[in-house]
Amino acid sequence: MVLYQLLRQHPEVDDINLYDHKLTENEKLSKMVPAFYADSTEVQPYTPDAIMADNQMVFFATSAGVTSQLSRPYIAAGFPVIDLSGDLRLNDEDEYQRWYHKPSASRQAMTQAHYGLADFESAAGKKYVANPGCYATATLLGLAPLIQHDLIDLDTIIVDAKSGTSGAGKNPAQSTHFTQANDNLQIYKPNQHQHIPEIMLELQSWNHNVKAIQFMTTLIPITRGIMSTIYAKVKPGVDGDQINQAYEETYSDKSFVNYMGEHLPDIKQVVGTNNCNIGVVYNPVTNTVMADSVIDNLLKGAAGQAVQNFNQMFNYKETSGLELQTFLP
Amino acid sequence: MVLYQLLRQHPEVDDINLYDHKLTENEKLSKMVPAFYADSTEVQPYTPDAIMADNQMVFFATSAGVTSQLSRPYIAAGFPVIDLSGDLRLNDEDEYQRWYHKPSASRQAMTQAHYGLADFESAAGKKYVANPGCYATATLLGLAPLIQHDLIDLDTIIVDAKSGTSGAGKNPAQSTHFTQANDNLQIYKPNQHQHIPEIMLELQSWNHNVKAIQFMTTLIPITRGIMSTIYAKVKPGVDGDQINQAYEETYSDKSFVNYMGEHLPDIKQVVGTNNCNIGVVYNPVTNTVMADSVIDNLLKGAAGQAVQNFNQMFNYKETSGLELQTFLP
Amino acid sequence: MVLYQLLRQHPEVDDINLYDHKLTENEKLSKMVPAFYADSTEVQPYTPDAIMADNQMVFFATSAGVTSQLSRPYIAAGFPVIDLSGDLRLNDEDEYQRWYHKPSASRQAMTQAHYGLADFESAAGKKYVANPGCYATATLLGLAPLIQHDLIDLDTIIVDAKSGTSGAGKNPAQSTHFTQANDNLQIYKPNQHQHIPEIMLELQSWNHNVKAIQFMTTLIPITRGIMSTIYAKVKPGVDGDQINQAYEETYSDKSFVNYMGEHLPDIKQVVGTNNCNIGVVYNPVTNTVMADSVIDNLLKGAAGQAVQNFNQMFNYKETSGLELQTFLP
Amino acid sequence: MVLYQLLRQHPEVDDINLYDHKLTENEKLSKMVPAFYADSTEVQPYTPDAIMADNQMVFFATSAGVTSQLSRPYIAAGFPVIDLSGDLRLNDEDEYQRWYHKPSASRQAMTQAHYGLADFESAAGKKYVANPGCYATATLLGLAPLIQHDLIDLDTIIVDAKSGTSGAGKNPAQSTHFTQANDNLQIYKPNQHQHIPEIMLELQSWNHNVKAIQFMTTLIPITRGIMSTIYAKVKPGVDGDQINQAYEETYSDKSFVNYMGEHLPDIKQVVGTNNCNIGVVYNPVTNTVMADSVIDNLLKGAAGQAVQNFNQMFNYKETSGLELQTFLP
């Protein structure tokens, strides 16, 4: 839905076709998504051949376990795909099944897919982009300078991540029932969140000595937004200046990552935008660095980063269609 | 759940037995309701004969359409029942089916049941109490002095009632999904809420000239609480003093209704208590009286009023077990 | 802030200068409004002569009682102004003082200002636009077809309006303290809200027989959005079809008003847009029509309508800079 | 306010007198605290001699920097005090000034005060009880078994604590303005929260080798409740069973601490009660233990623990006046 909104106002996008693999005949979008009451677009049944004939690329916004099946003909044909699901983010079948509890795509498909953490690895020239998960994006962007500049004890990474309920999708559930979620905090999937393995893979691509991270997720009573609070012990001799410099260097030229020094961002600063804002405080008493990394889970954590990958893939301006403003107050 | 909490601390209640008509063998309450993790009580299968043998009365907190069936043996035996469902609040089979869309109890059962608006009709000596609905309670208490003192044009009653999500029960649904309910207001069941007919019956028992009311319900992003905002044109010659006096007279001796004059109560004032707080402002420019009536939908609007009826039924002190304090801040 | 965001992305706006009448020298916007941390714009001290020399028009977003003073030189010079305050919305000095409790602008200034309810009265050719209040906008758009088509008994209009806290501005207060506002509903300013007189003036411009309306405002625990629930008795002989037709006719050609028939809009449908969505249900049992009119109070209720008036004033496309998308989920 | 509510229903408390050091003559409580509209109690001016003559003990619920002054005559007279402020929780004047930025009580007064972490140190026989801070209570109860049983590397303690807005008191501020706090998370006082030194003192009383903790506080959009999420590396050889056993042993006989094993408690489980619920998950991959400790900040984190200390001080049953039920749903 958010992806469709972004593409509708993207200057390089002329036509958008919508498909649903559960449809057998056309249905009005306005009927399927009441919020689009004023939109006369028809959603079409899913037919890979017609899709490849009628379009120049495809976005997948399907559930885990579904995309791995649906994506096969496109991979075979070398047709450009940006995949918002987690199905091809890992590169090992067993690992996928362990974290997702579903049948996986083939190892070959997984290893050939490009993990599109767009601020670090360009999707230019790629055919299949596995768009990162929301928690993974906030956490990786918060950790990158510390890992890449070798500033922390790799054995001490702790991530206390918090997310609003829109990350859980549109289907009602007990934990996101208003009566349960309002006025509450709920820790869920302790050490078991499926974004852990993709975070590990990316960290290891930066430094193969990273062995494990402690990663906890808490459901908070807001609709949109993620705050990833990251802790690690710094290496002997590292001080606040070095940390600051690493973040400055890493992010000074990135369009969508704002390093704010010791000004710790709150979530509302980024909701409505494709930005990741990061604040960092070093505590010399505990030799611990704390990074506060916030994103809009539906934009930078999903549809926004997908469009950023789309821009890279087709050599459009990276910020094209993403010049969004914060949704304040 | 709230009823069970009230009864556990009720000074006149020694033993509480819990039954569930879906069980075939005993099950721990702590397993059925995670919030009671520390409670070792067993919930028992539902068997009317044993229930009547082992207890002095029974509360029904079952769904609409279920209680009408389950309650039969108790009615036949003249065993005391307080029924929190809506199944025996009306007195006509067709009317019930029209508003509830379910098979009704018998007309005889319905007409014999006592509608337990506890601040107005005592349950003393009654065998079967149909405990009023939450919206009905807030609305009837707000309207009573105006109707009983014949102060308003009966053709002009408009009720704009707002409720938190706990009124919709514990089962997740689209409208109470946090992502949908948060930051939102949703009007639902316009002119079709099933509390309308019980309000009409009670109003007509006070003045048979009441023909209809305009009654709208809006779902608001809070967990507990109802505000019923009531409007009506006053009769020619009626002024603010007369209105004030009618409310004073009606409620000066009621334990659970606080008339606050022109101080309009907010919802948090009553959450956690069995109180109904009412503020009233007369507007001489429009000849309109506005009453703001607030309750905790789970207490005065359900379990609290049920205990109040229980106290009346067994001649206990009316406030017994209901000396509750507001849950502020 | 929202106005500045809209103007920054308006295709017809090249330069925006910001002024603050409390400054004596330039100050960085990023310092005054932390949310604009990435904006290097300087806010300038307020000097009318320089402002008129350097700009083609001015927006006022100052407080009640301030704009009436600051606007004088522009009125004298015939310089284009769009004024978001309430200072020149009325046309009588005593009436202004009665509702705003502040010294008023001159009667001449007030009567010459154009009340810019943009979907009904074009600002083309106007020099001074008094941009309507948020409650007034939602209420007037909801009532217009009923009044203009003479469908209701003018003596029976009741408006139960609900607003989020952003309408109260950015300064903390007791009623908008999170601890007080969360989980709560608070009625405020009963029959005394300062938007009542501007609603009355506009209604009377449509039908001079409207004498008074009952208008209540309730603070709800959301940040953005207004729902104005409007009730009135229909005239004898009027039925649902006529009502439906009146809304269809009135709004079929308006860019920003969506009439949705009996589908009652919720607030989130319009938040983030300049739309007013309206649903209407006629109740033949009470002869009462209920209109549910929702807007984003900061857009259609303030900055969005101001830009719409700006587009009319300068003959730009009416939707220019206002092609906004709903902020869902 | 919550303290007053608890004492009103405490079976051992006959009379409660209220005093305010800012009053010069009696004032009705109902006027000072609108929520107590129905309470005819008079609040009296503050006069230590009369207070000691008329009462058997005194509770202080005054601000930091105030109690240190007001408490002097009681300390001099050996009159029983339970002090909810932070003024006498530390034992060093410089340390107090460093964290509180206010003049401190005398070192003598501070060292003689009893730090009343009621589940661990009984207040029986004490004259002056410094009631612990809310964050300190949740954090210390979550950490105690790990420290007391010597299970963790003391150098690796990280606390990510989250609190609702009621912890910030009743005065409106920017960060607790609904428009700012709703839909948001805000980290505040990084490494500077004034509860850090009292946590350190207590930890060191259990194990003097604790040198520092990393302690962060985040403001969350709920009214009541604290979740303290605690991380630490376990010592070599320690496993999940040992951790589980330590918590079992520590808390099996404590009335108000519920150890729930791997069932991680959410905040709503304890709101309305004097309970601290704790869940613990050990992650063998990272050798990290995570404890999730939740309390109602106004009860266990303030007034509830104060009453628990009161019960200990006067040899009443520890749970007297504290048999509270969760406020669900």
Image: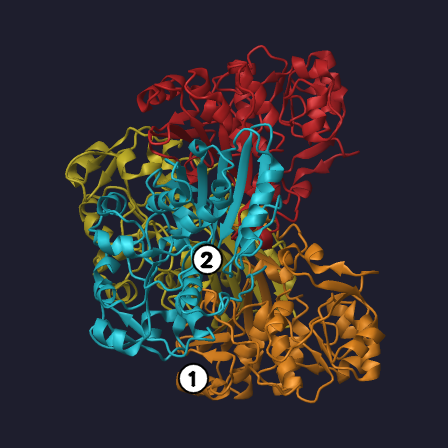
Chain colours: A cyan, B yellow, C orange, D red
* Callout 1: chain: C
Observer able to see residue B87: no
Residue denoted by label 1: C244
Label 1 is placed on what type of residue? Asn
Horizontal and vertical percent position of residue C313: 67, 85
Residue at 33% over, 32% down? D285
Distance CA(mark 1)–CA(mark 2): 43 Å
Residue at 44% over, 24% down? D256
Answer with left or right where residue C78 lies relative to residue C140: right
Closer to the camera in the image, B90 or B121: B90
Horizontal and vertical percent position of residue C42: 73, 63
Q: Where, by quadrant of the figure, is residue C10 drawn?
A: bottom right
Q: Where, by quadrant of the figure, is residue A67 drawn?
A: bottom left
Residue at 72% over, 22% down? D94
Label 1 element class: helix
Horizontal and vertical percent position of residue C197: 68, 74
Q: Nearer the viewer, mark 1 or mark 2?
A: 2
Label 2 is placed on what type of residue? Lys
Query: Is B298 drawn above or below residue A30 in the view shown?
Result: above
Residue A300 shows which numbered tag?
A: 2
